[in-house]
Amino acid sequence: MKPSICWKPGLALAPLVLLAGCGGASTENAADDPANAAVQRGPMLGDVDLSAPLQLRPVEGRDWALDLAPGRILFQQEGAKDVPFYPVSPRMQGNAAVYPTQTPDGAAVTITLKPARCAEGSALAAEVKIGTRLLQGCAFAMTVEQVHREMYNEALAVPYDAGNNSSD
């Protein structure tokens, strides 16, 4: 006896009906759809998103700079090696964002940002206290390209050690 294929019109449509439900329900408002959800902004200080990378530097000259981004705080000073500070999230204190951190040697560092137009292109005044030393300047938004270039330059600054092979 040969097996036969039965054709039942009602059963043939059942798989198609089930597959139709796999596409997900459309929502009237695209913002309600999790697939279209925008990246949430971080803590705000005035109009500035503190989860976006910032560079702090003096209004005049460029003898120091501090890159401030989520997971990264890097202090740069002319003629000295770059110093990473322990990365911390800002603490909102009134109308200021305060980053209490420290140097790798354990010296206290306090970075304070306040809304103020201290230079063209800057919406935040910055104060960096390293131990007893006080630096004042402004915070400027950094583009993704600037952050990548800084990280690339950091990677190039690390000397290559051909004898350091961790796969041995």
Image (cartoon, helix red, strand yellow):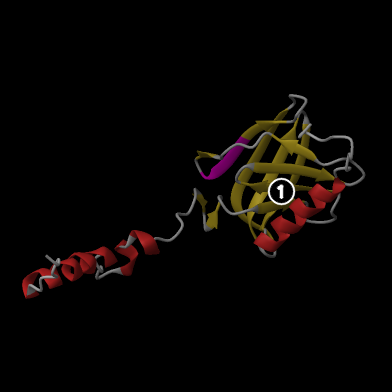
77 vs 32, nearest the viewer: 32
Instruction: Characterize the magenta stretch by its predominant secondary structure.
Output: strand
The image quadrant where one finds the C terminus is top right
Can you name the residue that lies furthest to the front here? 1
- Relative to 7, residue 96 above or below: above
Q: Which residues are magenta?
A: 95-99
**Percent x, y for residue 13?**
14, 72
Q: How many marks?
A: 1
122 vs 147, nearest the viewer: 147
Residue wearing tag 1: 67
**Percent x, y for residue 152?**
77, 54
Classify residue 39 as left or right of residue 18.
Answer: right
Q: Circle 1 sits in a helix, a strand or a loop, which is it? A: strand
Task: Please rate how many residues cluster around mark 1, counting C-alpha atoms within 10 Å: few if below 14, some from 14 to 19, many from 20.
Answer: many
The image quadrant where one finds the N terminus is bottom left
Answer whether residue 98 is magenta in the image. Answer: yes
